């Protein structure tokens, strides 16, 4: 027998209309936040960043591909990984098909990771993705945009991620969970294992999204978001939030989409 509240269709409609008012208010507030996001001051980018793409070596300006706006997904795939982060991969499954729509609205898109091009291309083929994916291997790009940190920074408490400084990592990190390490998040050891790394190596790379604009030949940084700021881009969660049991999570349940059913 269900332990959930049940009722008549009239009961449901009354409750649904109350929820609808709250949903409309959230939508209005979301519109206001979008305007506030777009009103942030632009920061000129004078540093020369180099990337390796399928077309060859590229600058940050080249990633615009003739458009005036660029969205970058900072995909967790470090040089020591054997596979991309499964959480980032789940997000990528959601944005893989939207690139053509962005491009036809004057917005270029690229995922960027530190892994060398060969690793990115092999994993991209395995996943069946088509979105542009650039390697920042050897570049300061990931570090400058707060999605990669050195081992020394990790040990000494020099990581500033999601606009907050993290405490020093306790030793040993291998096999630990983020909850044991930082005290406020769930386990990542299982996720790290899916990338062929330990917690320390895995968590030196981080996820995020950054926006840039190109005006009069000058690139400006306009926006970045990290951690749960990416929830709105994680398509599967938007669907689960509308399912009867919601996210219904008891641990790390997601996998690379070709690894479900393999234990």
Image: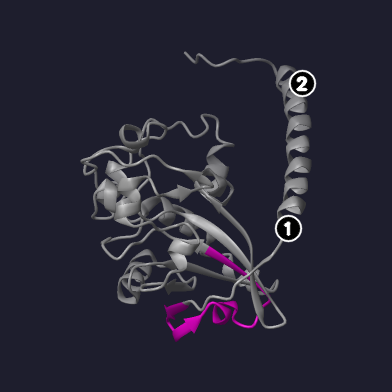
Question: Helix, strand, or loop for circle 2?
Answer: helix
User: Helix or strand or loop: what does disc 1 sit on?
Assistant: helix
Q: Residue at x 33, y 49 (%)?
A: 154
Mark 2 Cα shell of 10 Å, populated few (<14), some (14-19), many (≥20): few
Q: Position of residue 166 (x, y in %)?
A: 42, 42
Give, as a single range, the part of the protein colored magenta: 50-72
Vertical position of residue 86 compared to residue 64: above or below: above
- Name the residue that disc number 2 marks: 14
Q: Is residue 203 visible?
A: no
210 or 126, which is in the foreground?
A: 210
The residue under the point 63% across, 68% down is 212
Which label was assigned to residue 38? 1
Q: Quadrant of residue 45?
A: bottom right
The quadrant of the image that shows the C terminus is: top left
* Visible residue check, residue 48: yes
- Compared across the picture, whether 99 is left or right of 85 comes to right
Q: Position of residue 197 (x, y in %)?
A: 24, 53
Whether 130 is drawn above or below 31: the answer is: below
State the image coordinates of residue 234 (x, y, percent, origin top left). Answer: 52, 49
Q: In the image, 65: left or right of 254? A: right
- Residue at x 61% of width, y 64% of height: 211
- Residue 202 part of the magenta segment: no
Residue drawn at (28%, 53%) of the image: 201
The answer to whether 242 is drawn above or below residue 134 in the figure is above
Q: Is residue 68 magenta?
A: yes
């Amino acid at each position: 027998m269900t332990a959930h509240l049940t009722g008549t269709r009239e009961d449901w409609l009354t409750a649904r209309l109350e929820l609808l008012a709250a949903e409309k208010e959230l939508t209005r507030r979301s519109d206001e936040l979008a305007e506030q996001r777009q009103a942030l001051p632009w920061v000129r980018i004078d540093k020369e960043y180099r990337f390796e793409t399928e077309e060859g070596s590229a600058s940050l300006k080249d990633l615009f591909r003739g458009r005036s706006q660029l969205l970058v997904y900072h995909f967790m795939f470090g040089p020591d990984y054997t596979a991309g982060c499964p959480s980032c991969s789940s997000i990528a499954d959601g944005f893989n098909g939207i690139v053509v729509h962005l491009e036809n609205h004057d917005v270029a898109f690229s995922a960027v990771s530190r892994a060398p091009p060969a690793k990115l291309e092999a994993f991209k083929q395995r996943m069946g993705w088509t979105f542009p994916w650039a390697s920042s291997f050897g570049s300061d790009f990931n570090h400058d945009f707060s999605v990669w940190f050195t081992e020394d920074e990790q040990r000494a408490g020099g990581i500033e991620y999601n606009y907050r400084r993290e405490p020093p990592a306790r030793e040993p990190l291998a096999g630990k969970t983020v909850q044991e390490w930082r005290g406020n998040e769930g386990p990542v050891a299982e996720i790290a294992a899916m990338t062929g790394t330990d917690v320390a190596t895995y968590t030196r790379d981080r996820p995020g999204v950054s926006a840039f604009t190109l005006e009069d030949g000058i690139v400006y940084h306009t926006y970045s978001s990290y951690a749960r700021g990416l929830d709105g881009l994680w398509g599967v969660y938007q669907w689960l939030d509308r399912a009867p049991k919601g996210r219904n999570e008891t641990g790390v349940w997601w996998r690379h989409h070709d690894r479900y059913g393999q234990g």
